[in-house]
């Protein structure tokens, strides 16, 4: 087994670093600092560039060159990287106050799947939403308190997802039409000392889950067996992604202060971690494939 090395290449610290995505077209890493309302971009050896967002940004997806898709507090939007302008795509109407969109990732068909979360409470008022190619939003699941771990198998036929407060990462069969079936428990992350945060899938179909409360990543086989744990030099890692020239480097943002219960005064808290030498490759991110129509409100029952 390869012996990996971890480093903290950047001096800046995020309050709530999340949603890393590697753009193979640019050789660049994008991620967000949710609480600072920033989208960030970094190329090894260069400075970090950032763009402001109009509300807390939970996650991002690659799109056509020069654009990202944002999941904001209450909807989806384009970010134009040249001008910094933010253009609304669709609203998401939360059923209660103090909620926002959180973790998300594109499926293999280029649709953006994003869950919501409640703030400063534990009520399961959230949902899992999918931004379709035409800009409509479909609600896939209800009864969620803190959406995390959204990712897809290499063939796109399995979706992984967690309500972090449950401690369980679950799996579903994910049809080509995007319908969910055959729900089952994939991993009980509490057995490994932490609720699950973000996750990604490598080229072998194994799932990497951030164990946010114990400073580790865990790699699970497609059948849920624990294959490996990886200690990180930050107290609260949030979400991994593979990148680098050969997709063999792991990038992991982290938390300094969520504004809620997760915070740390350690000097490395909030750092971006770069892990090399794993001997494992990831998969390229699928860009969002839609060209949405003007904004339309989303409410009512799931389709």
Image: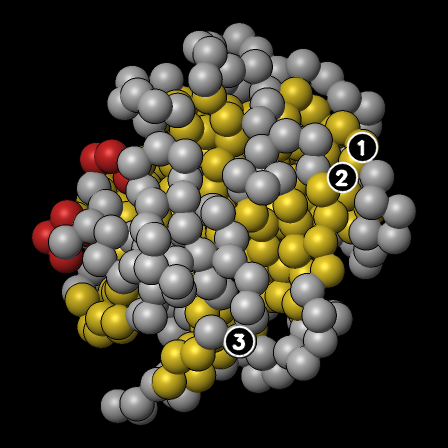
What distance separates the C-alpha of mark 1 from that of mark 2?
A: 5 Å
Choose mark 1 or mark 3, whichever is in front.
3
The spot of residue 108 in percent (x, y) is: 56, 54
From the image, tell me which residue sits under label 1. 87
| Label 3, residues with CA under 10 Å away: few <14, some 14-19, many ≥20 | few
Q: Residue furthest bottom?
A: 2
**Residue lying at 73% horizontally and 17% vertically, measured from the top left:** 296
Mark 1 or mark 3, earlier in chain: 3
Whether residue 140 sits left or right of residue 182 in the image: it is right
Q: Quadrant of the N terminus?
A: bottom left
For mark 2, what is the residue? 78
- Residue 156 showing in the rendered view: no
| Residue at the image position 68 percent from the left and 73 percent from the top | 43
Residue 280, x across and y down, in percent = 40, 81
> Which residue matches tag 3?
9
Q: CA distance from mark 3 to mark 2?
A: 29 Å
- Mark before the other along the chain sequence, 1 or 2: 2
- The picture places residue 54, in percent across and down from the top left corner, at 70, 31
């Amino acid at each position: 087994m390869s012996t990996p090395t971890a480093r903290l290449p950047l001096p800046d610290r995020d309050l709530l670093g999340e949603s890393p995505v590697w753009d193979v077209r640019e050789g660049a890493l994008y991620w967000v600092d949710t609480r600072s309302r920033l989208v960030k971009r970094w190329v090894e050896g260069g400075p970090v560039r950032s763009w402001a967002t109009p509300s807390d940004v939970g996650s991002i997806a690659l799109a056509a060159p020069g654009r990202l898709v944002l999941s904001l507090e209450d909807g989806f939007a384009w970010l134009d990287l040249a001008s910094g302008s933010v253009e609304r795509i669709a609203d998401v109407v939360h059923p209660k106050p103090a909620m926002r969109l959180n973790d998300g990732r594109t499926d293999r068909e280029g649709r953006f799947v994003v869950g919501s979360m409640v703030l400063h409470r534990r009520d399961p008022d959230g949902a899992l939403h999918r931004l379709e190619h035409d800009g409509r939003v479909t609600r896939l699941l209800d009864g969620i308190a803190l959406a995390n771990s959204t990712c897809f198998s290499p063939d796109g036929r399995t979706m992984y997802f967690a309500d972090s407060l449950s401690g369980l990462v679950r799996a579903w069969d994910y049809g080509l039409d995007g319908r969910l079936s055959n729900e089952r428990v994939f991993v009980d992350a509490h057995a490994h000392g932490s609720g699950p945060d973000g996750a990604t899938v490598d080229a072998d179909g194994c799932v990497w889950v951030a164990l946010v409360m114990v400073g580790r990543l865990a790699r699970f086989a497609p059948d849920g067996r624990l294959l490996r744990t990886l200690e990180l030099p930050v107290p609260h890692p949030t979400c991994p992604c593979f990148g680098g020239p050969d997709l063999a480097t792991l990038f992991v943002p982290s938390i300094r202060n969520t504004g809620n219960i997760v915070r740390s005064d350690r000097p490395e808290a909030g750092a971006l971690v770069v892990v090399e030498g794993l001997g494992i490759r990831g998969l390229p991110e699928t860009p969002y494939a839609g060209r949405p129509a003007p904004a339309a409100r989303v409410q009512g029952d799931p389709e």
